[in-house]
């Protein structure tokens, strides 16, 4: 009997890892037995996700099952334990991301996402560098309401990127790939990573960061707070990285006068703005207004304060009522339902690991080790960030990376004296920026690397360079910008 959706070896390894915590390795002093066993379930789940023993949603469901049936969170109370296992579904940020997936479907369905990209290419696409900036700014515009960086970079912008490259005679073969296609592909991926760091709703795992900050530091990071903190460093990176790659990895074709004409032809094929696109534009600005705290600026009355997830429901309601989206569209959006499922499980596991004291124990252990070095909090935080980033070589998913490491690294940094909000946000940005390193770093990587324009050696080489540059740009940009904002 074949099990096509199960990889036997990774599944056995995940099971073995879980059993180690249950039956072989005793809990260290200060850690409760049930907390230790919960850690085993968590590590086993992450191992299954990394090894792709099951699709991520399936692995997450096994995690929910094990917490409910073993009662590690509420011994002797099976009903309460099952309620604990399902508690992640009440997290509002998870539903914010899920609904944002639905809204991003509207950008693909109506063609508005492609229209935005072609507008930018037409405006500044007379040079190859201009095309890269045009597509980069299109990424930036779409990122607040498209939480799937795969859909954004691979579904909307990649086809445009490739069609422009091929229109200039650049195809994924050794003879022509370096004309423009390789450069545009590499820039597209790196910008996709940068925009993923700029908004909570720009990539699905970001709410795991805000959940970790809330659970450990008792600080709620709003959508507007994250976006404001990331805006200047993110914009600097978007402006600098294409230019740097243009100098270090130059395309053979520098002038592209036909690109603007090509984009204009595509816009003519799309025709004038349709009603469904106009409605979607209205919803887009409505969501930005709500998420940025606009209603609160109109009145100090608490009734004017709108939760970010409630705002997302408002936007979705408009799209459903107007017919821009149908219920069938929502049912077919597998990414949304999949994300809600696995996010709920991972958030639940991380929450109870913190409640049962596992994160505090780990943080104190690492803190005591680093404290012997006699470093200040800035030096210690820098070391933690670098370790956190380059460990991503061993991860094929931002979700698995954040789930496995964020809470621990954040807890250690705070314990060593790093300001919680500043360190949490920067580590959150780094959680996306680390994906630059490899051709499997995040969901959009296999799509763009798989196009064949960039070799693996080039991808890893320039990914390492861009990762270091991004960290420097964000560190410098955050230092100055956050001073203006009064964060330190």
Image: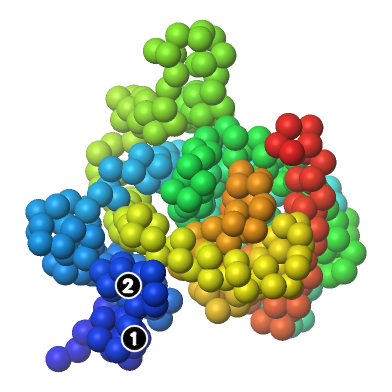
Instruction: Look at the image and tell me whether residue 203 can be seen.
Output: yes
* Pointer 1 with pointer 2, Cβ within 8 A: yes
Rendered residue at 49%/24% (across/down): 290
Rendered residue at 29%/50% (across/down): 88
**Viewer-nearest residue: 476 or 424:** 424
How many other residues sit within 10 Å of disc 1, few (<14), some (14-19) or many (≥20)? few
> What is the quadrant of the C terminus in the image?
top right
Residue, disc 2? 36
Estimate the x, y position of residue 262 in percent, counting from the top left. 70, 48
Q: Is residue 221 left or right of residue 249?
A: left
Image height of 267 relative to 394, above or below = above
**Viewer-nearest residue: 425 or 297:** 425
Rendered residue at 48%/50% (across/down): 216
Q: Is residue 205 left or right of residue 244?
A: left
Q: Quadrant of residue 78?
A: bottom left
Rendered residue at 33%/27% (across/down): 317
Q: Is residue 130 left or right of residue 400?
A: right
The mark nearer the N terminus, 1 or 2, is 1
How many other residues sit within 10 Å of disc 2, few (<14), some (14-19) or many (≥20)? many
Instruction: Look at the image and tell me whether residue 447 can be seen.
Output: no
Estimate the x, y position of residue 203 in percent, counting from the top left. 51, 52
SS at mark 2 in the image? helix
Q: CA distance from mark 1 to mark 2?
A: 9 Å
Image height of 460 relative to 254, above or below = below
Estimate the x, y position of residue 340 in percent, counting from the top left. 32, 51
Q: Residue furthest front?
A: 29
Q: Quadrant of residue 183?
A: bottom right
Residue, disc 1? 25
SS at mark 1 in the image? loop
How many tags in the picture?
2
């Amino acid at each position: 009997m074949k099990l096509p959706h199960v990889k036997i070896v990774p599944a056995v390894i995940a099971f073995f890892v879980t059993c180690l915590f249950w039956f072989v390795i005793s809990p260290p002093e200060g850690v409760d037995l049930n907390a230790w066993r919960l850690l085993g379930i968590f590590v086993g789940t992450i191992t299954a996700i990394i090894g792709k023993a099951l699709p991520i949603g399936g692995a997450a469901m096994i995690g929910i099952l094990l917490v409910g049936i073993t009662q590690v969170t509420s011994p002797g109370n099976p009903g309460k334990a099952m309620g604990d296992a399902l508690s992640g579904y009440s997290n509002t940020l998870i539903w914010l991301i899920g609904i944002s997936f639905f809204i991003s479907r509207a950008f693909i369905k109506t063609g508005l996402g492609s229209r935005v990209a072609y507008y930018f290419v037409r405006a500044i696409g007379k040079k190859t560098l201009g095309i890269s900036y045009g597509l980069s700014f299109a990424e930036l515009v779409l990122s607040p309401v498209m939480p799937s960086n795969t859909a954004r970079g691979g579904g909307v912008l990649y086809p445009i990127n490739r069609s422009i490259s091929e229109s200039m005679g650049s195809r994924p073969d050794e003879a022509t790939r370096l004309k423009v296609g390789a450069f545009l592909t590499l820039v597209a991926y790196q910008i996709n990573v940068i925009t993923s760091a700029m908004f909570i709703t720009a990539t699905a795992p970001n709410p795991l960061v805000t959940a970790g900050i809330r659970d450990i530091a008792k600080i709620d990071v709003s959508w507007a707070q994250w976006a404001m903190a990331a805006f200047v460093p993110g914009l600097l990176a978007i402006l600098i990285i294409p230019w740097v790659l243009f100098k270090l990895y130059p395309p053979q074709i520098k002038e592209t006068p036909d690109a603007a004409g090509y984009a204009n032809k595509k816009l003519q094929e799309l025709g004038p703005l349709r009603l469904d696109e106009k409605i979607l534009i209205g919803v887009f600005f409505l969501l930005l207004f709500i998420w940025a705290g606009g209603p609160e600026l109109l009145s100090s009355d608490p009734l004017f304060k709108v939760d970010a997830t409630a705002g997302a429901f408002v936007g979705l309601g408009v799209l459903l009522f107007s017919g821009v989206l149908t219920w069938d569209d929502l049912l077919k959006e597998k990414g949304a339902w999949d994300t809600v499922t696995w996010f709920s499980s991972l958030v639940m596991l991380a929450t109870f690991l913190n409640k049962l004291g596992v994160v505090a124990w780990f943080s104190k252990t690492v803190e005591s080790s680093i404290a012997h070095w006699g470093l200040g909090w800035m030096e210690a935080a820098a070391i933690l960030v670098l370790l956190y980033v380059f460990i991503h070589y061993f991860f094929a998913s931002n979700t698995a990376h954040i789930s496995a490491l964020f809470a621990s690294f954040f807890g250690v940094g705070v314990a060593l004296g790093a300001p919680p909000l500043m360190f949490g946000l920067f580590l959150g940005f780094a959680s996306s920026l680390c994906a630059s390193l490899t051709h499997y770093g995040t969901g959009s990587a296999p799509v763009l690397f798989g196009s064949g324009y960039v070799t693996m050696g080039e991808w890893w080489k320039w990914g390492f360079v861009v990762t270091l540059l991004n960290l420097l740009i964000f560190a410098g940009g955050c230092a100055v910008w956050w001073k203006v904002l009064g964060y330190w």
